Image (spheres, rainbow, N blue to C red):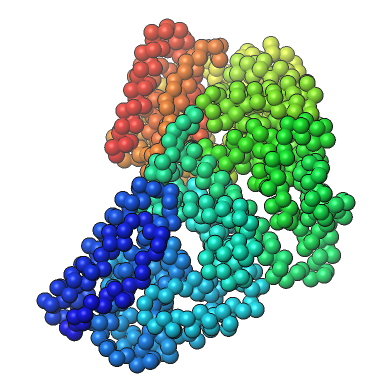
Amino acid sequence: MAQDSNKVLASFIPAAPESIICAPEAIFDIDAIETALETAFKNVSSAADVRNETVRILTEANDAGRAAIESAMMQAPRNSRPTTHAYAWLTDCLVTTVLYVSQTTLHPNPHPSEGERIAVLAVGGYGRAEMSPFSDVDLLFLAPYKITGWIESVIESMLYMFWDLHLKVGHSSRTIRDCIRLGKEDYTIRTAMLELRHLAGNRDLTAELQTKLRNDLFKNTAREFIEAKLEERDERHKKQGGQRYLVEPNVKEGKGGLRDLQSLFWIAKYVHDVRNVTDLVKAGVFTADEFRQFDEAETFLHAVRNQLHIVANRPMDQLTFDLQVEVAERLGFIDHSGRRAVEHFMQFYFVHATRVGELTRIFMTALEEQHVKPEPALQRFLKRKRKTAVGYYVHRGRLNVDDPKAFLTDKLNLLRIFEESLRTGNLMHPDVMRLLSANLDLFDEEFRARPEAKRIFLDILLKHGNPERGLRRMNELGVLGAFIPEFQHIVAMMQFNMYHSYTVDEHTIQVVSNLAQIERGELIEELPVASGILERGVNRRVLYVALLLHDIGKGRKEDHSVIGAQIARKVAPRLGLKPADCDTVEWLVRYHLLMSDMAQKRDISDPRTVRDFAKAVKTRERLDLLTVLTVCDIRGVGPNVWNNWKAVLLRNLHAQTADALEHGLEAVNRSTREGDAKKALRDALSDWTAKDRKTELQRHYGPYWSGVPTSVHLVLANLLKNIKGDEIKIELKADEDRDATRICFAMHDHPGIFSRLSAALALVGANVVDARTYTTKDGHATAAFWVQDGDGHPYDKTRLTRLKQMINKTLMGEVVPREALVSRDKIKKRESKFRVPTSIIFDNEGSEIFTIIEVDSRDRPGLLHDLTRALASNHITIATAQIATYGAQVVDVFYVKDMFGMKIHSESKRAALERKLHEAIEQGAQRARES
């Protein structure tokens, strides 16, 4: 093979950047690599051998360089720019060394013609010299005229070596004319060529391309480029969920992520011809303070992405729950103030994402004004907004102020601008956003105490029909936290669990938005009870303020409901509410979870549940307010949290409690319910003989009659009719009202039925949400289970046959649940980092005839079976079970009796049973970890 004995590798490799995380020699020792290549090439006889030896040497160099960068990075993990530059320079060294081998050894051409003097350029993120550990390598092979046979051979050999080096290379081979033509046709290509960086070869050709791009492609096309980038941004945000506060954000593509900052720089470069980010201030794009924030955000986001790649050991931009914990630790966050390190880390992340959103909004809006074509006159006429108040004007659909200095002389204007924006339906001009952000110090105690300030804020909440828009903009600009300092604590606060889809502040705004939607009459069919309450009339001021403050106590060691109520006691008067209204707000914040807990964690067919809840709320007014608050709160947790099951539970609890408050608590009792239920079933069985009706009505104990509705009594009556000794009868039906599949059973009674049923359902992936089991006086067992599939919906009809077969096999003993569950009872990797401590509570006061056992633990498929098996082995009979799931956490509540049909009064028996339940949970968790 032809070789060049002179030391020329250094002439191919670009100089190391000044800002680099460690010594260049530690990343890539050019002389040592060249010597190693020369030595290896002395003993080769074919092109394949040259490639193999090059790949072997460069693989070792790449591994060593990456190890050096990672080691240095861990010493200063948040100083990300020198790290991204180091990875880019290591890639430069690999790419240009491969070029060197291809040009000097594999395809030597000492005297190339003018048409063969190619240039190799980095494009895209690689062109910016910003690379994370597993970033793509995008290359442009630029030829003066056409791609000759020799050029093709050089490139082909390079690509073979890149693939063997496991570099993810995207490449194109073009002439300058190709670049201009394709850039005109494709905005992605045009964007990539904005960030060209010369690596090796014909530097004059690179300079010519850059000149031609500026003169023949970029010049006079800013408007169309900006429009394309804005459209691309909107599509990207929509694809990523459209929210800046999704709790598993995409660091690169998500709202407030790196791509938003990059889009900003692309446009600035296109419009202003800036060379690097520091030029943004000179170009008038940002103030010095805004650039500092831009720089801090970009540095932090790159630091996060670097660690993500290292932890995942592959290209990874999604901050999934399991990776968040490791990235937080690597970036130096620690547990403190009652919150985990990962929660502090994610709050820091969302603060930066919010600021990125503001910076890009300011910049993009200004550019839209300058470069995006205005709407046609007819469309502007059809969209005419209300006339603005004195001191304001609208320019291109954006609300601005006539005189910034005069605006600031009256502090009230800092709030008025938001009401004016809502009143006129205009978005704010970027100049106004800057003005507000720069003057948050004007919010002081004297200002907050002004009656007019309180009035304006409450009007923003109550008067314009879309308070969420005003609140969200106030929050993003820092005004909401400035006016209500206690709110600042929950801004960008992430709750590390799978239940909440948004940060606490965004959840709060979503909750307020839900209330506004109900008020606008948009959810009458979906939320008839809440809609009816609002139509009849409630204290809107109390309700909106309670919603705004309901989670304000989060992020502290103490119960957030208790702390939140204490904060509400201070904030509500400051917002101008009357003493009686302040008391109601405080009560609503203190007990905002009460109705949800009662509905989901207690048996509302038990009269004691309704009586206890009625005693807690005391008045119909508070019941109605709490009902609406609860509905809005649950709907604001995440996209798929609210369902018909929760709706039915809350609807029934509201109706029964309202009835109890109207007719007296003594009217809520078992005997009344039993009589009503028997009469309803007697009417439903009108086609039965009198003898069969009497048999059915007399075979059940008291709790059966209040435990399930008449529709279930009727199904179970038909299953029990003429049942044979060992026969198992099952009926499966979709219960659309409850968003679940209802499964009714009738069979001969024997111990552990509940446990075996729960195992059978777990084996087919069914999630039990409610269950009732009863024993008849003639020795039969009846049960009604409501189950959902993995997506929280009723089972599809096509899957019911398999569900029924598995239940039959389990009940007949053909399947051993404990063994069969081993392969299914796993904890997903994404959920592995959640801490869910187990707590077990015994309650003998919440029911007249049952002991209530509440088990709060980590959810997994086999948990319900493990718990019910432990109860059965200790001779505990389960009457009902309510299962409430909150992401990775589950609360299983059992209404039970001992083997003598009594409550578990003995403290020693309760302690022994608690130990057995803890053992069952731990053994199952260990099995899940090992499987």
Residue 204 point in image, percent of width and height: 44, 84
Left or right position of 567 against 801: right
Left or right position of 144 against 25: right
Which residue appears at 40% of the width and 24% of the height?
Answer: 868
- Quick one: quadrant of the C terminus? top left
Quick one: 397 or 77, which is closer to the camera?
77
Which residue appears at 61% of the width and 32% of the height?
Answer: 551
- Quick one: quadrant of the N terminus? bottom left
Quick one: 280 or 681, which is closer to the camera?
280
Residue 897 vertical position relative to residue 195 in the rendered view, above or below: above
Quick one: 61 or 314, which is closer to the camera?
61
Residue 711 point in image, percent of width and height: 60, 30
Residue 636 point in image, percent of width and height: 62, 40
Left or right position of 140 against 355: left
Residue 489 point in image, percent of width and height: 59, 35
The total of numbered circles placed on residues is 0
User: Is residue 564 visible from the viewing direction of this image?
Assistant: yes
Which residue appears at 37% of the width and 21% of the height?
Answer: 917
Left or right position of 866 against 413: left
The residue positioned farthest toward the bottom in the image shown: 113
Residue 512 vertical position relative to residue 211 in the rendered view, above or below: above
Quadrant of the rendered image containing residue 507: top right
Which residue appears at 82% of the width and 70% of the height?
Answer: 377
Residue 215 vertical position relative to residue 573 in the rendered view, above or below: below
Quick one: 546 or 554, which is closer to the camera?
554
User: Is residue 766 visible from the viewing direction of this image?
Assistant: no
